[in-house]
Image (spheres, rainbow, N blue to C red):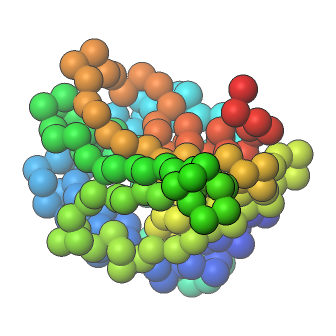
Amino acid sequence: PAEMGFQHGRLLAQKIRHIIKEGYMPKALDGRGYTPEYTRAQSERMEKHFPPEIREEMEAIAAGCKAAGVEDITYEDVRLGVTQAEIQHFPPDSPPSCSNFACWGKWTTDGRLLHGRNLDWSIKGGAQDDAVIMIWRPKGGIPFMMPGWAGGAGSVSGMNARGITLGEMTLPSPDATFDGLPLFLQMRLVLEKAEHLD
């Protein structure tokens, strides 16, 4: 985890700084009225559920940024990057978003399954400015890829080397809380550990 995180931070330090300090994150959170105190508190609540190896990787992302000369990225900044989706989708009256499709059999030219996903976020936030396709090859895990953003230890879409694909769709619920694992990490851990659909 530390090696993957350090390389991520070192190679993408400038993009990580942009998305966290100037681009999407300030627009998505501060620009929509979420205070730093509120977002920090909710992010800390979710962190209690992070596996140790995810924390290690996220700490190493921040260390990789520092090694590349970007001194102002902290572990807390990286943590907010994987918890911000829950923060934005609470309270539960926020609109549902994103869409997926899948087709197979007679609906594809060779019968194989095709899965597509649309991220229904506004381009006004600028997340696309720091978009990356991350490929992880974890020791003891399944290689997997996720389209996402620089600095992200997870995302909302991806595929693993066993052919499992995932695409998240947000549908807020009135009984949701911040006391759980954020969706970016749920998606990532499924891809990293799931050998088959069962």
Q: Where is residue 72? Give x, y as percent.
A: 45, 71
Residue 16 visible within the image: no
Q: Is residue 124 left or right of residue 145?
A: left
- Residue sitting farthest toward the right: 140
Residue 103 visible within the image: yes
Q: Is residue 155 left or right of residue 9?
A: left
Front residue (pair 79, 135): 135
| Quarter where residue 193 is shown | top right
Q: Is residue 14 left or right of residue 41?
A: right
Query: Residue placed at 33% from the left, 22% from the top?
Result: 177
Q: Is residue 113 left or right of residue 127?
A: right
Query: Residue placed at 33% from the left, 69% from the top?
Result: 127
Q: Quadrant of the C terminus?
A: top right
Query: Residue placed at 80% from the left, 38% from the top?
Result: 195
Q: Where is residue 114? Give x, y as percent.
A: 57, 57
Check the image and report above or below for 147 versus 187. Answer: below
- Residue sitting farthest toward the front: 106
Front residue (pair 31, 99): 99
Query: Residue placed at 82% from the left, 46% from the top?
Result: 141
Front residue (pair 103, 66): 103
Q: Where is residue 30? Give x, y as percent.
A: 18, 57
